[in-house]
Amino acid sequence: MTKKKTKEFVIKIVCANCGVQLYKYKKEGPGSLIKCYVEGILKDYTKGNLECHNCN
Ligand SMILES: [Zn+2]
């Protein structure tokens, strides 16, 4: 059995202020994340506004 390698990277977005995990983001290809697209968000830990629930 072989695993197919996909060119998708899942990265965790954390609050720059307090470090709380905000959401998991699916990214295509390596490199730094420049823009955040809502479609790429896998798991949202916020209340839907993508803002930190800890420190806003
Ligand atoms: Zn925060």
Image: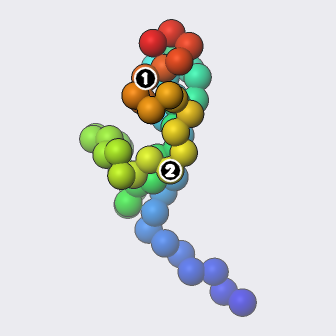
Spatial distance from mark 2 to mark 1, Cα to Cα? 15 Å
Reply above or below: 26 against 56: below
Way the structure is coloured: rainbow
Residue located farthest toward the top when viewing the structure as drawn: 55
The residue that appears at 44% across and 47% down in the rendered structure is 41
Measured as percent of width and height from the top left, residue 9 is found at: 48, 57
User: Cβ–Cβ below 8 Å for labels 2 and 1?
Assistant: no
Element on which disc 1 rests = loop
Which of disc 1 and disc 2 is earlier in sequence? 2
| Label 2 CB-ligand 1 distance < 8 A | no
Residue 1, picture quadrant: bottom right
Reply above or below: 31 against 47: below
Measured as percent of width and height from the top left, residue 8 is found at: 46, 63
Measured as percent of width and height from the top left, residue 16 is found at: 46, 19
The residue that appears at 57% across and 29% down in the rendered structure is 21
Q: Amino acid at mark 1?
A: Glu
Reply above or below: 37 against 29: above
The residue that appears at 45% across and 12% down in the rendered structure is 56
Work out whether residue 39 can be spotted. Answer: yes
Residue located farthest toward the left when viewing the structure as drawn: 35
The residue that appears at 28% across and 40% down in the rendered structure is 34
Q: Which mark is residue 51?
A: 1
Binning the other alpha carbons within 10 Å of mark 2 as few (below 14), some (14 to 19) or many (20 upward) gives some
Work out whether residue 18 can be spotted. Answer: no
Element on which disc 2 rests = strand
Reply above or below: 50 against 28: above
The residue closer to the viewer here, 47 or 34, is 47
Q: Tell me how many marks there are.
A: 2
Q: Which mark is residue 42?
A: 2
Taking 16 as reference, is 36 left or right?
A: left
Q: Amino acid at mark 2?
A: Leu
Taking 5 as reference, is 26 left or right?
A: left
